[in-house]
Image (cartoon, rainbow, N blue to C red):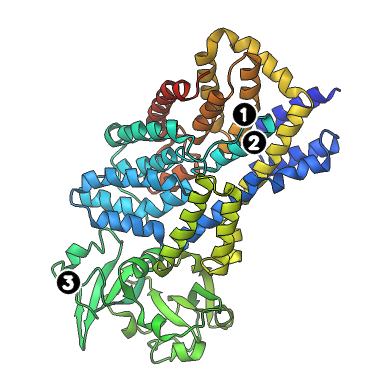
Amino acid sequence: MDPVTILLILFALALVLFATEWLPVDVTALLLLGSLLVLGLLSPKEAFAGFGSDTVITLAGLFTLTRVLLRAGVIEWVGVALSRRARNAAGMIRGMLGAVAGVSAFTSNTATTAVFLPVVTGLARRAGVAPSRVLMPLAFASILGGTVTVIGTSTNLVVSGALPATGLRPLGFFELAWVGVPVAAVGLLYLFFVAPRLLPAQDAELEASLRAYLADLTVAPGSLLTGQTLRETGLGRDHGLTVVAVRRGDQTIYAPGPDFRIEEGDTLAVEGPPHRILTGKGTLGVFSKSEQKLQVEGAVPVRLVEAVVLPGSPLVGRTLRESRFRERYGLSVLALHRRARTIERLANLRVGVGDVLMIQGPADRVTALGDHLTVLGDLTEAQRDLRKAPLALLLFGGAVVGGGLGLLPLSVAVVVAVALAFALRLVTPEEAYRAVEWPVIVLVACMLAFGTAFEDTGAARVMTGAISDLLEPLGPYGLLAALFAVTVALTQPMSNQAAALVMLPLAIGTAKSLGYDPRPFVIGITVAASNSFITPLEPSCMLVYGPGRYKFMDFVRVGLGLTVVTFVVAMLVIPRVWPF
């Protein structure tokens, strides 16, 4: 059997596996690479070159820099700042969606959706709008923003990295903006005025399954809360925190009303999910006295964990102060979860069997907690430290500007920024490695190698010749439309990156055989692969699928219209900016 036939068979099998996901996409990609090696269609040097490519290095670095922004609380700060300035909440939701699109042009759209999810839900409730009518637009806005820059989505970077092997120059940092900005602008108008009419009015189930913790948080000098009533702070509405008691001097006010005015130095007993308490500590100007009293050297790794109190623990029946918890364990308790709701302050609660403590301190101390406390989960990466936000923004902005202006290759700018983030302890190497989406890295590296085999064996010429004969009567506009539609169809059952890498050599080869400039078709495939709306299989969509209580057909109904809008705008803009 000749090499072309073998490669086309492997290609067809890979398409089936990508579409059905009988195996994870990265496993399918590795099997494909292994087959190419065993059958002698690629040398080891050619097969493994993708793992050291600029594209893979840049992707891994950007995953890490996005984690740095999240750890510094930068994205949460943007959301909270916008919601705090809201006067017209309904209009503010639209402004927030615009901000989401802007942020996701430079960071992972999945991370952007996750961070803005509680903020947008709070704004929706404030405006009297069902959260289900804004959560899907939130996910779609983050996807739309990803088309604006080459780092907006991993798909854009994958396409850009694959172009040099085909003889084309990589995508410029803002090259996609010529079509990405119009697509995002018109798409946002659709999300503002059309999508809410097509979506069901259902309440969200955003935090129903999360543990509600009780924490004592003291209002620091210069806090945003000072001088405001509880109603004005929006602690419950916007931050998901319920104030159950307030300690002021020697007086404790239980269940304070909405007109209760907060003063500097007040200790608020708040109840809420762990991530809300941690975010509040980073953005509202409050602190935990227990945490402040525990001095931890900067070089010592610090962990934040959830630990359950077991029978026989010396803590049972005592308050944390009585049990001398901090002195005994060298750790601080930030919050406590108990099944039965309480309006008591954390400092006054007597610990019981089954209570869950949120504990912070040196990693070795956490490991040595003993038999009377069992660690349930690690919340270390959920912590936010706004003091590091300016430095995190400076590093990320430096990498973007350096790469965008061509002062350095983007891969070099990103690697330098990551190295500085490690050196300045903005993120630990272990956390950075966990932040990298390794299936995407493996998929990209393997498919780059497959692209090499596709060209070297002549399979690309065979397939593009057949496609050219079929599509030649359509003309360049028909060809662009057909490639866009096929790419959109492929992104529904398979990953966006895989769809783009499958379509890219076919589009370039077909365009060249028909005498067209391949550039407009490359742009069309990139836009089509990056904008996947019709099913909830996109990670950003999966984040809102459950909380919005959506059905599968809700995405089809709303996403199909947005896909048509994206298609129309792309067809109008692409040929004018990148002539055939």
Q: Quadrant of residue 428?
A: bottom right
Relative to residue 65, is residue 565 drawn left or right? left
- Classify 10 Å Cα crowding around label 2: few (below 14), some (14-19), many (20 and above): many
Q: Is residue 432 visible?
A: yes
Real-space Cα separation, disc 3 to disc 2, in angstroms: 56 Å
Under mark 1, the amino acid is Leu
60 to the left or right of 30: left
Q: Earlier in the sequence, mark 2 or mark 1?
A: 2
Q: Nearer the viewer, residue 393 or 525?
A: 393
Q: Measuring 21% from the left and 87% from the top, which residue is drawn there?
A: 249
SS type, badge 1? helix
Q: Quadrant of the N terminus?
A: top right
- Whether residue 549 appears in this view of the structure is no
Residue topped by disc 2:
162
Q: Position of residue 448 (x, y in %)?
A: 69, 38
Farthest front residue? Answer: 407
Residue behind mark 1? 504
Is residue 360 placed above or below 480 in the rendered structure?
below
Pointers 1 and 3 in contact (C-beta within 8 Å)? no
Position of residue 363 relative to residue 23, above or below, is below
Image coordinates for residue 568, horizontal then vertical, percent: 41, 22
Which residue is drawn at the image coordinates 32% and 50% (left, top)? 120
The crowding category of the residue bearing disc 1, from other C-alpha atoms within 10 Å (few below 14, some 14 to 19, many at least 20), is many
Q: Secondary structure at mark 2?
A: helix
Residue 180 place in picture, x, y as percent = 43, 34
Instruction: Say which label, 1 or 3, has the lower sequence index.
Output: 3
Point 15% across, 69% down: residue = 257
Residue at mark 3: 227
Tell me the mark number nearer the camera, choosing from 2 and 1: 2
Q: Amino acid at mark 3?
A: Gly
The residue lying toward the viewer, choosing from 177 and 499, is: 177
Q: CA distance from mark 1 to mark 3?
A: 59 Å
